[in-house]
Amino acid sequence: MTRYKREDPEITRRKFINTALGATAAVGTVSLVSALGTANPVFRLTRDKMPPLKGDILVHASEDKEGQPVTVAELGEKLVRAWPQGKDAQGQPLIRKGDPNNVLALYKFPKGQIVAPTNMDATIDGEIVAYSDICTHAGCSVGDNDQQVGEMKCPCHSGQYDPKRACMVVGGPPPRRLAQLPIRLEGSNLVVADFFLENPYPFNESEWEARKKAVEDQLG
Ligand code: FES
């Protein structure tokens, strides 16, 4: 299994995405869903709620293209949102959107623009990078910063992130950066290469370790 060097930590489904694109009213709902996902003892970790897993294909999350595999040609300095798509118990394709926190942010920057502390081994050719798209402040879906190409801005409380530098926080209230997701190219598909390198929202470090173990135990 590929080992990724860890850097120092800083960081309703379709309704949720739509809300994130144009409004902010779903924050409470998302936070509630997130809390259920980590704290409720009766929460069932079904495959659609599992976090992005090694081998998952990245597919579009936008309404007009939902479920279509993301291609390199579609990526650039503007955010492309994606879901991880794995398989159900019968081996059929399954988009893991049972947990709205699984939304991902994809970017492609010219060679040399993605720099440390981004984990370069977890990018595709140092040009394509993937992060959790969920703000570490209160769980909104982060978008592009319309005032600054290549930066991200949260619609809820104006948290800002730099996707060329490990999605470190560059403004606003988020307590830590967005978690980077290791990806690789397999044919024309972007594929998940491993778990997030650090705890994504809403997990703290120990909860994230517990979640990974629960997934591994369940899948064998
Ligand atoms: S939820 Fe993103 S800045 Fe508050």
Image (spheres, rainbow, N blue to C red):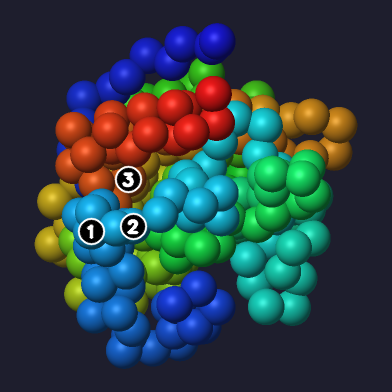
**Image position of 64 with respect to 90: above or below:** below
Instruction: Look at label 1 and name its amino acid.
Output: Asn
Q: Nearer the viewer, residue 205 or 119?
A: 205
Would you say residue 170 is visible in this rendering? no
Side of 162 where 40 appears, left or right: left
Q: What amino acid is found at the position of numbered circle 3 in the picture?
A: Pro
Is residue 53 in view?
Answer: yes
Q: Position of residue 43 (x, y in %)?
A: 33, 57
Please state the horizontal and vertical placement of residue 207, each as a whole percent of the image. Answer: 22, 39
Picture quadrant where residue 60 is located: bottom right
CB within 8 Å, label 1 to label 2: yes
Q: What number is the disc on residue 40?
A: 1
Q: Which mark is residue 206?
A: none
Q: Nearer the viewer, residue 115 or 59?
A: 59
Which residue carries the number 3 mark?
200
Q: Position of residue 87 (x, y in %)?
A: 71, 45
